[in-house]
Every structure is written in structure tokens, then in C-alpha cells.
Amino acid sequence: MIECYLIVNGRSDGHVMLPSIPNRGDIVSLGDHKAPHYLVHRVEYRNNSALVNLHVQKFANEVSCVNAVSGYRNDRSFVDEL
């Protein structure tokens, strides 16, 4: 497990233990649909450390995340290309 610190608007919002380091655009969930969800904007590796800073955008819960993030569990902006 990798310890990742969540950074929202330049301030720490706690940390999570993740099995792998997420990529930009990934969603980090704390396991409960009512808990905050995070959209990863940037991954920052710390020198000589196993810690990783994730610069994220915070959403109050899964529903607000789904409604705000295009392409995450919805297809509202899906364009069928021929």
C-alpha cells in the first residue's frame, strides 16, 4: 500500500492508503458513496520518500462527482463518431 496525501487548493485534506498510484484524471473514492470523492489533477512524487502528494478536486459525494465530471459513469457528453 502506498500512502498518498490529498492536497485541495494547496492545503492538506488528509491521506489515504492506495494499492497503486493513481493517474491524472482518476477518481479516488474512500469506499462509501456518501464520503468525499476526489478527481486527481496532478501527482507529485516527493524526493527520497515513499509518500505521494495528489493534487485533487474534492466533491462532497459520489452523486456530485458523477454530475460534475464528464465521462465518469455517465455519457451525457458522448459524441458518436462515424
Image (cartoon, helix red, strand yellow):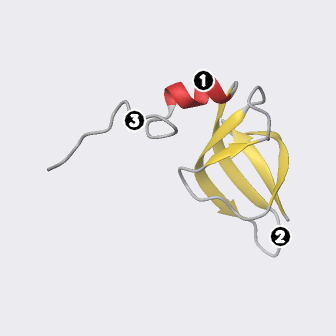
Residue at mark 1 = 64
Q: Nearer the viewer, residue 16 or 67?
A: 67
Residue topped by disc 2 = 50
How many residues crowd mark 3 within 10 Å: few (<14), some (14–19), many (20+)?
Answer: few
Residue 57 sits in quarter:
top right
Amino acid type assigned to the residue bearing label 2 in the image: Ala
**Residue count near mark 2 (Cα–Cα under 10 Å), binned few <14, some 14–19, many ≥20:** few
- Residue plotted at (62% across, 24% down): 63
**Residue mark closest to the camera, 2 vs 3:** 3
Residue 21 found in image quarter? bottom right
Amino acid type for the residue under numbered disc 1: Ser
Eye-nearest disc, 1 or 2:
1
User: Residue at coordinates 14% horizontally, 50% vertically from top-left?
Assistant: 82
Residue that label 3 marks: 75
Q: Amino acid at mark 3?
A: Asp
Q: Could you say where residue 25 lies in the image, as x and y percent from the top left?
A: 53, 50
Residues under labels 1 and 2: Cα distance? Answer: 31 Å
Q: Position of residue 54 (x, y in %)?
A: 69, 52
Image location of residue 19, percent across then percent down: 78, 63
Q: Secondary structure at mark 2?
A: loop
